[in-house]
């Protein structure tokens, strides 16, 4: 007969209990993270258009899908930038440029500043529907352009 000290049994039981508590806390933490910081694909409205704001101050409008660390934007539009700040930008369908790009537009996740689901009644969404129905090339509001980039400090002349 082999005698097992009660202290060893106590350590095994406490170790198993500790591992169980850690596993439960890790599971709860993962679920909480998913609720607080959902994956982009979980919050993108597939039935509508999205505005994708890039770190380069460009804004594109289209149907967005997430593919790992890439964003795939289809049916892409953007606002032209008129030289006169008093003139509103015009909505342009991507694909008419000299290099004739085709869908989807592939955007690395690191290039995306933020994404917004657009309402059906937004001026851009209405303008896209009008343009698709052949009602011309409507003018979209200049207010939908990307916000100005934050000022970046200039390098010092003494460096």
Image (cartoon, rainbow, N blue to C red):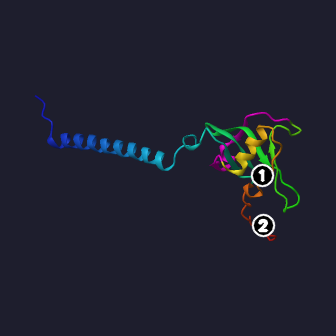
Q: Is residue 58 magenta?
A: no
| Residue designated by label 1 | 140
Q: Where is residue 85 in the image (x, y as percent from the top left)?
A: 84, 62
Q: Position of residue 27 (x, y in %)?
A: 39, 42
Q: Give the range drawn in magenta.
A: 100-120
Nearer to us in this view, 111 or 155: 111
Q: How far apart are marks 1 and 2 (CA)?
A: 34 Å
What residue appears at the point 72 percent right and 59 percent down from the top-left corner?
147
Q: Where is residue 107 in the image (x, y as percent from the top left)?
A: 70, 41
Q: In this view, does 147 lie above or below 34?
A: below
Label 1: how many residues lie within 10 Å, few (<14), some (14-19) or many (20+)?
Answer: many
- Give the mark, 1 or 2, whose residue is nearer the N terminus: 1
Q: How many marks?
A: 2
What residue appears at the point 80 percent right and 71 percent down from the top-left corner?
158
Q: Is residue 25 left or right of residue 151?
A: left
Q: In this view, does 50 lie to the left or right of 84?
A: left
| Residue designated by label 2 | 154
Nearer to us in this view, 59 or 133: 133
Q: Is residue 151 above or below residue 60?
A: below
| Displayed quadrant of residue 49 | top right
């Amino acid at each position: 007969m082999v005698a097992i000290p009660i202290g060893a049994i106590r350590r095994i039981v406490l170790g198993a209990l500790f591992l169980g508590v850690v596993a439960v806390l890790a599971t709860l933490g993962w679920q909480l993270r998913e609720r607080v910081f959902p994956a982009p694909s979980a919050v993108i409205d597939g039935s509508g258009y999205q505005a994708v704001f890039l770190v380069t101050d460009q804004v594109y409008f289209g149907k967005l899908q997430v593919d790992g660390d890439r964003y795939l934007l289809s049916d892409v539009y953007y606002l032209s930038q008129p030289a006169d700040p008093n003139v509103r930008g015009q909505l342009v369908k991507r694909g008419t440029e000299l290099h004739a790009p085709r869908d989807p537009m592939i955007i690395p996740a690191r290039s995306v500043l933020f994404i917004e689901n657009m309402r059906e009644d937004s001026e851009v969404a209405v303008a896209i529907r009008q343009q698709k129905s052949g009602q011309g090339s409507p003018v979209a509001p200049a207010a939908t352009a990307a916000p100005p980039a934050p000022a970046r400090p200039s390098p010092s002349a003494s460096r």
